[in-house]
Amino acid sequence: MMKLRSMLFVPADSEKKMNRGLTSGADALIIDLEDSVAPANKPQARTMAAAFIEAHQNDSPAALFVRINPLDSGMALDDLAAVVQSGLAGIMLPKTLSAECVRIAGHYLSAFETKAGMPLGYLSIVPVATETAQAMLNMQTFNQPIPRLAGITWGAEDLSAAIGAVSNRDENGEYAPLYKMAGAMCLLAAASTGVPAIDTLYTDFKDPAGLLLSCRNARRRGYSGRIAIHPDQVSTINEAFTPSEAEIVHAQRIVDAFAANPGAGTLGLDGKMVDMPHLKQARRTLGLSA
Ligand code: COA
Ligand code: MG
């Protein structure tokens, strides 16, 4: 499975930012055709995105994704027609209404892959799954594996706009319950479909300490990566979502303990009980199939 610890947004109408993205250390760039590009700039942004993908199809250290416009925007097919070509790794699909949107986008990709002479089924899809009220009510549709799905992420900004909230934060600065629920639904949907959960962006890009703390919490909760909106966020995200040396050593000890005691369902290690869920988590930390 593709490594998606850090996915950095780069607006497609900024050649400077796209180029800067290449040296950011991000696992993936999300070349944005949606909200960071004004409507009047969309045609030019498509052309710039396509040229960038073509220019870096062989030398990009980051997987190249494009965030297209929503399926019901009337722009998605023009976006795909412009950018599906060799060098593209996948698309981010904003404002999905349900898993059905991912399937429909998958059919579109099949058609454009065929046109581009790419292997059928090559392109991945990462939906932003919580951006509308309907999407939230339909999160249970992400309950089984879906072709092309490579991760699921969530957003709090569009959701608050969709329901007419003044803010998605309470007065103490914490996410209001609906947005905590959106993040939790993202974790459930990702686990149910067997893909990584990718945490939403951290807006304050001048606060590396806050970002690190937030990423550590995200990883504890089950996220395996995060969206970045600024190149300065990438190294913090990569660090937070990489197991530490101590975690790897501990995970290896759990795996070794069970290997040395075949047939044991539960063991004592350093005076603490470890059983199957611990083994599963340890295998995941080591990058083994859980
Ligand atoms: N990707 C690549 N480069 C970026 C970048 C990004 N996402 N964000 C900033 N940079 C570059 C800037 O171009 C600038 O380059 P320079 O030093 O050569 O001038 C440098 O990093 C420092 O930028 P800074 O001044 O700190 O930020 P800014 O005020 O120029 O930009 C944002 C702030 C939020 C507009 C910008 O970070 C951005 O465009 N982020 C992505 C927005 C997006 O795609 N949103 C959609 C998803 S929510
Ligand atoms: Mg948005």
Image: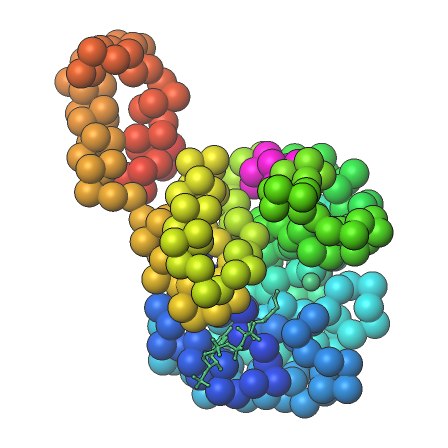
Bounds of the magenta span?
181-190
Looking at this view, is 78 or 285 the one in front? 285
Q: Which residue is drawn at 60% across and 36% down?
A: 184
| Rendering coords of residue 107 (x, y %) | 70, 60
Taking the magenta stretch, the answer to whether it contains residue 187 is: yes
Looking at this view, is 146 or 27 the one in front? 27
Q: Which residue is drawn at 56% across and 52% down?
A: 200
Please give left or right for residue 262 compared with residue 47 in the image: left
Tell which residue pokes out farthest to the front in this image. Answer: 171
| Rendering coords of residue 30 (x, y %) | 54, 69
| Rendering coords of residue 131 (x, y %) | 72, 52
**Residue 247's quadrant in the figure?**
top left
Looking at this view, is 252 or 111 the one in front? 252
Please give left or right for residue 60 compared with residue 166 in the image: left
Taking the magenta stretch, the answer to whether it contains residue 276 is: no
Tell which residue pokes out farthest to the left in this image. Answer: 260
| Rendering coords of residue 65 (x, y %) | 54, 68
Q: In which quarter of the image is ligand 2?
A: bottom right
Picture quarter with the C terminus: top left
